[in-house]
């Protein structure tokens, strides 16, 4: 009786948590560089059920050697739970902004940013700005690192900034100034062996938790565009409908268990004094 | 949950992609040399509930039971039909009548191909595209030339003062591909060779299946606004129809859940 109640409740709780994830993905449908999360659900370990039995015709306390006292009759499930919340790294759509400091990555690579002394994170959000000290950083204020792991300094007075497909930052000299184009740095774009080993730190930053990083080979940089969120509105709405009906079905189950318990108490357990 | 929910979602996503393609075509109605894209779809795998031909006693079952699982995008191909030739009276504008691409060299040394023949002269007299990429093989127009003509076979000649006959400067070459739809679009009206397009086949305009050139004309985009609007109407109604699949599945699930009062 009560066991079934908790089983149904786990289903309802998982459906509720699923809806929370979908709500987060939908609220970030316009966030540049956002990667949506999924929830992966597994069933709880099953409880083994046994039946006490002896040979038919024998008294229960007259066990005969070789005859099984406990007969296994199978298992009983006890609900579901969320065991992982993986991030989906599929490519988001490119949004052309014509802002020379906006970059979008196409491919599996990430930009490297510095989040603290000797701490790096990885991101796809490429809306870059130049700080008052001339350091190239993201909109969160974290400096972007180059292939050597150093921060990048740009002086906007020296001319317009051009970033090519491999991430090389070149500053074009003003026409007529007589200066050459200068290569400033190459953006440190890394690709990972297994993106499942990246841990999310906020929706757009990721921290490496065990994957092997390598220099970018399949990733190109597009200047003047930003990668929008990969949250899929249609899919999210369908998952929302699916989870809502799942939640309702589980709640009906809880109600059914409740009414059975009530019958047991009020009908079966009625004493003659009532 | 019901398969119909996810199948309808796949249908809506496919029509979204269709609208994206159509919008790009419409946005490029005025782009010189633009080739329109066409989105094509395929059905997804089928879940087999019962295979056809299963033996039943001495006979076999004549038909099976399958449930389809939606639609997916098969390809988004460039359609290489000829665009209208428009007169511009700019002597360096060239239009290709027939097959073939112009060859340009990108700043990093790689070659790209284009149908956009609106060429300009740079400060040293070399023929460049509007983005400053050099025509390949490059042709330089002398700075003292008073007029430039481009013949239908690609010969570029210039009138130099104090010379009666025009001076031949070079010949524009056209490039043919076995599978032009397999070229990778680069943006900026450029295409690059890919593994699917085949090797570039350079030839003189008018020979080996390459088209002829018309100086003073440009080739317009091959997008037909009427056709794209009709496709857009179809895509929107298909999107609505799939969304009805989603709402119907929702109501059916609601009915199922409400069976328990």
Image (tube, rainbow, N blue to C red):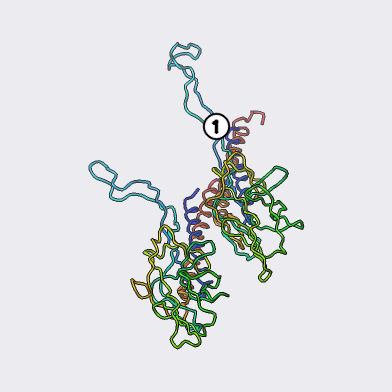
The structure residue drawn at horizontal position 73% and vertical position 43%, both measured from the top left corner, is A117
> Is B198 or B92 nearer to us in this picture?
B92
Count of numbered badges drawn on the protein: 1
**Residue extending farthest left:** B58
Q: Position of residue B134 (x, y in %)?
A: 51, 69
Which residue does the numbered mark 1 point to in the structure image? Answer: A45
Residue A196, by quadrant, is top right
Horizontally, residue A98 falls left or right of residue B77, namely: right
Residue A101, by quadrant, is bottom right
Q: Counting other residues with Cα less than 10 Å from the Cα at mark 1, is it few (<14), some (14-19), or many (20 or more)?
A: few
Task: Provide the secondary structure element on which disc 1 rests.
Answer: loop
**Residue extending farthest right:** A132
Q: Position of residue A242 (x, y in %)?
A: 55, 50
> Is A225 or B25 nearer to us in this picture?
A225
Q: Is residue B261 visible?
A: no
In the depicted structure, whether residue B41 falls above or below residue A36? below
């Amino acid at each position: 009786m009560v066991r079934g109640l908790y089983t149904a409740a786990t289903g309802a709780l998982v459906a509720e948590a699923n809806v929370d994830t979908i709500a987060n993905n939908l609220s970030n449908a316009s966030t540049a560089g956002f990667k949506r999360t999924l929830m992966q659900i597994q069933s709880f370990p099953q409880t083994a059920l046994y039946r006490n039995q002896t040979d038919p015709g024998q008294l229960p306390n007259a066990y005969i050697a070789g005859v099984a006292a406990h007969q296994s009759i199978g298992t009983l499930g006890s609900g579901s739970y969320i065991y992982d919340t993986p991030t989906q790294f599929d490519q988001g759509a490119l949004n052309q902004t014509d802002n020379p400091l906006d970059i979008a990555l196409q491919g599996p690579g990430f930009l490297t940013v510095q989040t603290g002394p000797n701490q790096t994170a990885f991101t796809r959000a490429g809306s870059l700005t130049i700080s008052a000290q001339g350091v190239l950083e993201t909109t969160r204020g974290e400096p972007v690192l180059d292939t050597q792991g150093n921060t990048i300094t740009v002086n906007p007075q020296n001319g317009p900034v051009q970033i090519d497909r491999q991430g090389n930052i070149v500053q074009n000299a003003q026409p007529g100034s007589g200066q050459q184009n200068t290569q400033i740095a190459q953006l440190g774009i890394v690709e990972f062996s297994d993106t499942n080993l990246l841990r999310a730190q906020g929706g757009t930053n990721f921290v490496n938790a065990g994957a092997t990083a390598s220099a970018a080979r399949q990733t190109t940089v597009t200047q003047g565009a930003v990668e929008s969120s990969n949250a899929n509105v249609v899919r999210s709405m369908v998952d929302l409908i699916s989870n809502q009906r799942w939640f309702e079905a589980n709640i009906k189950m809880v109600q059914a268990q409740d009414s059975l318990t009530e019958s047991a108490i009020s009908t079966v357990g009625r004493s003659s004094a009532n | 949950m019901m398969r119909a929910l996810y199948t309808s979602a796949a249908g809506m996503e496919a029509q979204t992609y269709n609208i994206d393609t159509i919008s790009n075509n419409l946005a490029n109605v005025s782009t010189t040399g633009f080739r329109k894209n066409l989105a094509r779809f395929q059905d997804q795998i089928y879940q087999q509930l019962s295979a056809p031909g299963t033996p039943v006693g001495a006979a076999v079952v004549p038909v099976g039971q399958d449930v389809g699982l939606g639609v997916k995008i098969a390809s988004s191909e460039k359609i290489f039909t000829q665009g209208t030739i428009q007169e511009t009276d700019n002597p360096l504008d060239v239009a290709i009548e027939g097959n073939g691409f112009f060859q340009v060299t990108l700043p990093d040394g790689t070659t790209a191909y284009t149908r956009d023949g609106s060429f300009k002269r740079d400060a040293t007299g070399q023929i460049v595209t509007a983005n400053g990429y050099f025509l390949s093989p490059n042709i330089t127009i002398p700075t003292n030339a008073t007029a430039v003509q481009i013949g239908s076979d690609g010969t570029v000649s210039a009138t130099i003062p104090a010379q009666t006959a025009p001076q031949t400067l070079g010949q524009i070459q056209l490039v043919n591909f076995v599978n032009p739809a397999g070229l990778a679009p680069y943006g900026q009206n450029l295409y690059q060779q890919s593994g699917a397009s085949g090797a570039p086949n350079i030839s003189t305009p008018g020979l080996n299946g390459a088209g002829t050139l018309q100086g003073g004309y440009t080739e317009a985009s091959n997008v037909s606004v009427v056709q794209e609007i009709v496709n857009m109407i179809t895509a929107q109604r298909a999107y609505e129809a799939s969304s009805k699949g989603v709402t119907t599945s929702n109501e059916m699930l609601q009915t199922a859940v409400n069976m328990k009062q």
